[in-house]
Amino acid sequence: MAKKDEAQESQEITASGFNPTGFFKETKEELDKVVWPSRQQLISESLAVLLMVILSASLIYFVDNFFNWGAGKVFGP
């Protein structure tokens, strides 16, 4: 039944053009379905992401410096 409603809505939208009020209403309905994280979960996961970015950047930095050093030893100054 939901598929019929969606198909009918899409036909109405294409027939009448863009409906801003309908768009914002549907957007609000979709945002109400979102399961938002708790404050503690948001903080801990954000810190985990920052830690992984810092570790990845550090690894790339050290590998780059190692290859620069190696290229300097092979090809000279």
Image (cartoon, grey):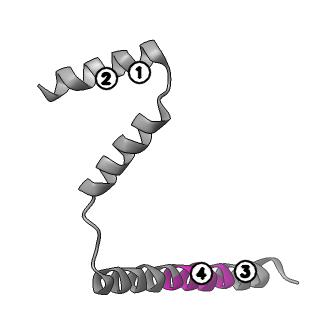
- Drawn side of residue 35 relative to residue 18, left or right: left
Give the camera-side residue of 19 and 71.
19
Give the camera-side residue of 15 and 69.
15
Residue type pointed to by label 3 = Asn
Q: Which quadrant is the N terminus positioned in?
A: top left
Q: Which mark, by number, is residue 68?
A: 3
Q: Which mark, by number, is residue 52?
A: none
- Locate residue 75, reporting x and y percent: 81, 77
Other residues around mark 4 within 10 Å, as few (<14) / some (14–19) / many (≥20): few
| Contact check, label 3 and label 1, Cβ < 8 Å | no
Residue at x-position 64% and y-position 84%: 66
Disc 2, SS: helix
| Contact check, label 4 and label 2, Cβ < 8 Å | no
Q: Who comes first in sequence, dot 4 or dot 2?
A: 2
Residue type pointed to by label 2 = Glu
Give the camera-side residue of 42 and 50.
42
**Up-down relation of residue 64 to residue 1 (above or below):** below
Residue type pointed to by label 1 = Ile
- Drawn side of residue 19 relative to residue 29, left or right: right
Label 4 vs label 2: CA separation?
55 Å
Q: Which residue is mark 4?
A: 63
| Contact check, label 3 and label 2, Cβ < 8 Å | no
Magenta region, residue range: 54-66
- Locate residue 48, reporting x and y percent: 38, 83
Report the mark closest to the observer, 3 or 1: 1
